[in-house]
Image: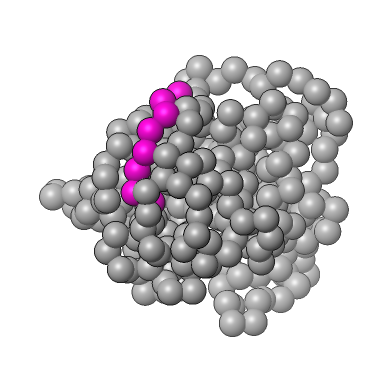
Amino acid sequence: MESAERPENPERGDVLLPAGSFRMGDHFGEGYPTDGETPFHDVALDAFRIDATAVTNAEFARFVQATGYRTESERFGTSAVFHLQVQATPEDVLGDVEGAHWWLNVRGADWAHPTGPLSSWEDLPDHPVVQVSWNDADAYCKWAGRRLPTEAEWEYAARGGLEGKRYAWGNELVGPAGEHFCNIWQGEFPRVNSLEDGYLGTAPVQSFPPNGFGLYEVSGNVWEWCSDWFLPKYYRNAPAANPQGPTIGRGRVMRGGSFLCHDSYCNRYRVAARSSNSPDSASSNCGFRTAG
């Protein structure tokens, strides 16, 4: 793969976070027991840099144009698209996912065609790139001279300097006038979205106010890959300084939730919430941001 310096993005940039410490994990007892959000514990981190936003379609396109990289969805020929987003002919919809019928397996869905072969990234240049696996995100990072953030770095950055809060902006989901601070599902999942926050699918980066560190959309919009392997029991014995995650796991950590999160089934837009997926998985609601 060709090597190239990471493109400059002065409009969205990245943020230098000084060394510091915080209390990591679920402070409210609201997490799913199988996710392992407890016990909350003290973590100290060295200084690091992290993107202010998720990597966009336009940025990922520059990577592909520079290297000729083909994502795993392109090589597999299909990927997962939320049923209300699909842009494809019926013959390209190959079926749904057992137990999660709102996910459809769509032929020709990939990063360049995020909701099916009749869609194009060029219509969404400032939206987060999706349909990228952990392996794809890692390949981008290597090209750009970056890396994926550790899970601890991600949570520290997402908290924005607020100690022990439920969300990156405080403890209440919406503001006093009903204003929304993130892109998640409103209505009756998975059939009716009232669009109170303005979006059915992804929102452009920087659509919602930044947190105290200047990071955008750390809750909702798209899941974001972290470098760590995922084990629910890891927090019980995680090191206090610069934890890197377990050496093995059942998948890679994802953080932040997505536009599909709703408290009726996926209350994972809380800043402590965590989930995982296999490193070769991709979908229309998962992207990444980089660190350095």
The residue closer to the viewer here, 245 or 83, is 245
State the image coordinates of residue 22 (x, y, percent, origin top left): 35, 43
**Quarter of the image containing the N terminus?**
top right
The answer to whether residue 85 is magenta is: no
Q: Is residue 101 visible?
A: yes
**Quarter of the image containing the C terminus?**
top right
Q: Is residue 81 visible?
A: no
The residue closer to the viewer here, 262 or 190, is 262
The residue closer to the viewer here, 110 or 30, is 30
Residue 136 is drawn in which quadrant? top right
Where is 172 relative to 128, above or below?
below
Q: Is residue 178 left or right of residue 292?
A: left
Name the outermost residue toward the bottom: 99
The answer to whether residue 17 is magenta is: yes
| Magenta extent | 16-24
State the image coordinates of residue 282 (x, y, percent, origin top left): 68, 57
State the image coordinates of residue 162 (x, y, percent, origin top left): 27, 41
Our reading of the magenta stretch's main secondary structure is strand
Residue 6 is drawn in which quadrant? top right
Q: Identify the residue shown where x is 37% and y is 74%.
A: 264
Q: Identify the residue shown where x is 83% and y is 30%.
A: 67
State the image coordinates of residue 11 (x, y, percent, origin top left): 47, 20
Q: Identify the residue shown where x is 71% and y is 68%.
A: 105
